[in-house]
Amino acid sequence: MDFHDTPDEAAFRKELRAWISDNLPDGWRESAPTSGRMDESVSREWSKRLYDAGYAGLTWPKEYGGQDAPYTHQAIFLEESARAETPEHIGVIGLGMAGPTIIAHGTDEQKSAHLSKILSGEEVWCQGFSEPGSGSDLASLRTRAEDAGDNYVVTGQKVWSSFAHIADYCILVVRTDPSAAKHKGITYLLVDMHADGVEVRPLVQVTGDPEFNEIFFNDVKVPKTNVVGEANEGWGVAMTTLLHERGTLGFALTARLEVLVAKLIVLVKETGAHDDLLIRDRVAQQWIELQALKFTNYRALTTLMRTGVPGPEGSIAKLHWSESNQRLGKLALEILGHRAQLDGDDGVWSGYWQYQQLRSRGNTIEAGTSEILRNIIAERVLGLPRSR
Amino acid sequence: MDFAFTEEQEMLRDQVRSWLAAECPAERVAELGESKAGWDESSWPKMAELGWTGLSIPEEHGGAGMGFLDEAVVFEELGYRLYPGPYLSTVALAVPALQAAPDVLVAVAEGRARATLAAAEAEPSGSRGAGLGDGDDPTTSAERDGDAWTITGIKEPVVDLQLATHVVVSAATTEGVGLWLVEPSPDAVTPLETVDSTRRLGRLNLEAHPATALIEPGGARATLGHIRRRIDAALALEAVGVAQRVLELARDYASERTQFDKPIGSFQAVSHQIADIYMGTELARSLAYWAAWSVAESQADAKRAAAAARSMATGVAVSACEASIQVHGGIGFTWEHVLHRYYKRALGNAAFNGSPATGRATVAASLLDQ
């Protein structure tokens, strides 16, 4: 057991820190971070710089444009990026979900067509999984694809899709065999978002930001060469995507929470709330929960490095993070008292905490609701009998 | 970055685990808990023989010359089986102060001696009868009598007092606080009634009782701080063992018990409680191992790490027991079932030297008062 960076990790961290500091866009740090805002042009430029410097796809195989680096480098990259509050890579979905799925299940043509463009940010990806009638029960999806010789023809609606409004491609799960059982008859497709019949409408969330979208597919032709894995075998492929979504998330989320806890401490001192024993107790609790998350991620990472598969500890990272993040947002607003209602230019820190608190309500819903995550822990980690 | 125990430490864990499974099954814990002595004295030389009592005692004093991370493995496993005996008191509390008494260290390593620390007082000048706080000065006093010392004062609660052969006592002189070694006469020891029958507490009433100096007056602060870091981390580790065991009990019971023709673990109102025990236990485990490493490696952050781990893990163990009792329904509320013994140990660990809030206060001070 040793929580220090190895000499190799320390060197990587040092070099990365210097690189981030040299490359952050002018004025980025000074501009008030009122939201988890994404400035598209800044993110595109940032993604390209990351790619040119070899920081995109650190753990991906070299043959696909990656670095073949150990997972610890990826963890360090996520930590340092969050600490420096860098812009987001434009290809969050491509890097975290589409890319790993294509690497695991894609054809050689799919790999050479997409992987390096995902890394460079040339191709932006979105995810077409959830539907208005299919949330937690993903396998009930109804978007259908009719067999039309060399193509499928896709019709249906997807929802809660981040980046869809700027995306070039979509990882899409569709029903290809309506007569088969629920988890059978699903096919996993790579869909060109610029194709005829694809329509994207923004969805405005409680924060007022249109962070995600609805996607409508009206008779969209998708070549069969864009099937990932086998036709009607898409459920297993989709599980790979979700495994990666939840697997790589822990470090990034925890590092973001670390930034928020540091800001919370600044707020407490700024407002004089550090004399309040109840506030002190809750701030300490937030900090302790953050350390617990951080070291749980380290533990899961050690298991991954030693065995090649993520440990069961990882399943709790997103669940606990979301709840801790929600508590933190509410605590910040309580500290602000009546000023908590003032927003935007009239608000403390230009409405930073108001945004954080409202945005956090989505955390226990997105990327697997807390209820579904508890089912996963109960059934898959602890082996309790299935609930349905 | 490497968050794993060594192969040797994992072997030690297996060894402790299988020894305890044989020596300390639930029925035996119940029997010992209800006995007058509260423990099986013959277990101590056996543990010494296996090398556990002297893990961090230097080799020249008969120990294994290993460290706190090795002891950490033992603390966790002892919590898992609710071992009733003076391991926590001897190893976490007393051994650091006994460095000045090598013959006692040898006796501990050989299983002839058991020791504890008497720092807390019923009417302390410090907070909540803690005795290990930064500003807790004892009212117990030490007086020099030629080359010898005598101690006068009342210490309580003292963990495992009636199980110990040697007691490290904190006391004040005009030159400051020091630590002394006492081999208490029988009339100085009064057993106290406790909630957790598997960990006994006592009152030490010293009236000009002979003592030997371990740490000279004015020098106790550093040693007591070191002990506090060790006990905080040890309590966290033991709490993780407790939480792990009651998690397994809840999981097994929910898988077997049927109502409405289904195992109750298939109802989400039940299974989600068990998932929460798992989540809390794993988070607490991460903190406890981090704290153990920080203490073992004397990291600058060790005090805060140990306080954080103790705060979360002892709280998690209490909640885990409560949820496990709830999952068990009526049977979990009976004297006959082992759960209440885990619950009482969890409550005892949470209350030791303060409460989970005490740990958070330490953390808050480090975050907000600089």
Image (cartoon, grey):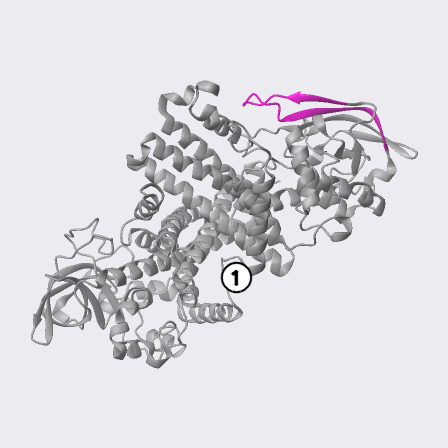
Q: How many marks?
A: 1
B68 is within the stretch colored magenta: no
| Residue B208 percent location from the top left of the image | 7, 68
Name above or below for residue A169 compared with residue A100: above
Dominant SS of magenta comes to strand
Q: Which residues are magenta?
A: A199-222
Q: Amino acid at mark 1?
A: Ala
Residue bearing mark 1: B4
Residue A48 horizontal side relative to residue A152, left or right = left
Residue B300 appears in the rendering: yes
The subunit letter for the residue under badge 1 reads B
| Residue A22 percent location from the top left of the image | 59, 41
State the residue at coordinates (55%, 55%).
A10
A219 is within the stretch colored magenta: yes
| Residue B202 percent location from the top left of the image | 20, 62
Q: Residue B342's image quarter?
A: bottom left
Residue A383 appears in the rendering: no
The quadrant in which the C terminus of chain A is found is top right
Q: Residue furthest right?
A: A149
Which of A232 and A239 lies nearest the eye of the viewer? Answer: A239
Name above or below for residue B174 compared with residue B347: below
| Residue A191 percent location from the top left of the image | 79, 33
Which of B262 and B206 lies nearest the eye of the viewer? Answer: B206
